[in-house]
Image (cartoon, grey):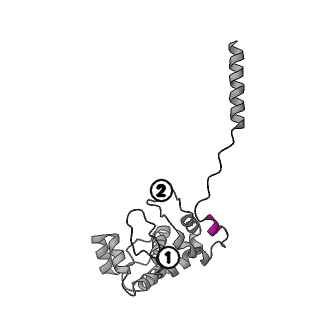
Amino acid sequence: MERLLLGTLLSLATTACASTPPPPPPPPPPHTELFEALPRGTTASCGLLPKLLELPFRPTDPILDPVYRLLRDQKDKVRDCLQDSITSTTPMPDPRHMVKADDFTVGDLAYMLLVDYYGIPFAELWPSDARADYEKRGAVAYSTWIRKPGNRNYLQRRVRAWFESGGQYRSGGDP
């Protein structure tokens, strides 16, 4: 009797499991359709900067944003367009976790991605007075300094010089 009951229960369990449909696949990450059709490694990829919604907080954090992942995976191919974008004042939502700026721009993101992808010390290429302010006030100093006329062009020249020197260009005078 026990064997018959056990056999019946196993048969019912197998039938129930076999008839349960598998769960649906997870939805694709946001913006997948935007970059699937883009030619890889072209300046078209920098057109996606305003679509980047989330920067990883720490280097060990999982990369959830597909635009960040695409640009990071193509970093050597999009490096020039990221440098070109430093001067952009096109507004966009701030993708950082902690500090949220109401006046965040595509140029700010381009600079932050270059810092992240290539290890440029964040304030090293700034003029000495802005670096000193950064030591006192942190990231707020960047927002204050970069909004002044001409400073985006200055930073762009300094970043280009840093790459041209193989990352050895140090703080000091204007390139």
Choose between 46 and 3: the one closer to the eye.
3
What quarter of the picture does the C terminus occupy? bottom left
Q: Position of residue 31 (x, y in %)?
A: 59, 65
Q: Is residue 40 magenta?
A: no
- Looking at the image, the residue that sits furthest to the top is 1
The amino acid pointed to by label 2 is Asp
User: Measured along the vertical axis of the image, is residue 97 above or below residue 147?
Assistant: above
Which residue range is magenta in the image? 31-38
Q: Secondary structure at mark 1?
A: loop
Picture residue at 38% right of the left edge, 87% below the top: 149
Picture residue at 54% right of the left edge, 66% below the top: 68
Q: Position of residue 88 (x, y in %)?
A: 48, 81
Kindly check if marks 1 and 2 are in contact, taking CB atoms under 8 A apart as contact. Answer: no
Q: Position of residue 73 (x, y in %)?
A: 58, 66
Picture residue at 27% right of the left edge, 71% below the top: 136
The disc placed on residue 166 is 1
Choose between 57 and 115: the one closer to the eye.
57
Is 67 placed left or right of 90 in the picture? Answer: right
Q: Secondary structure at mark 2?
A: loop
| Main secondary structure found in the magenta portion | helix
Give the residue number, with chain letter if any, for mark 2.
Answer: 61
The disc placed on residue 11 is none
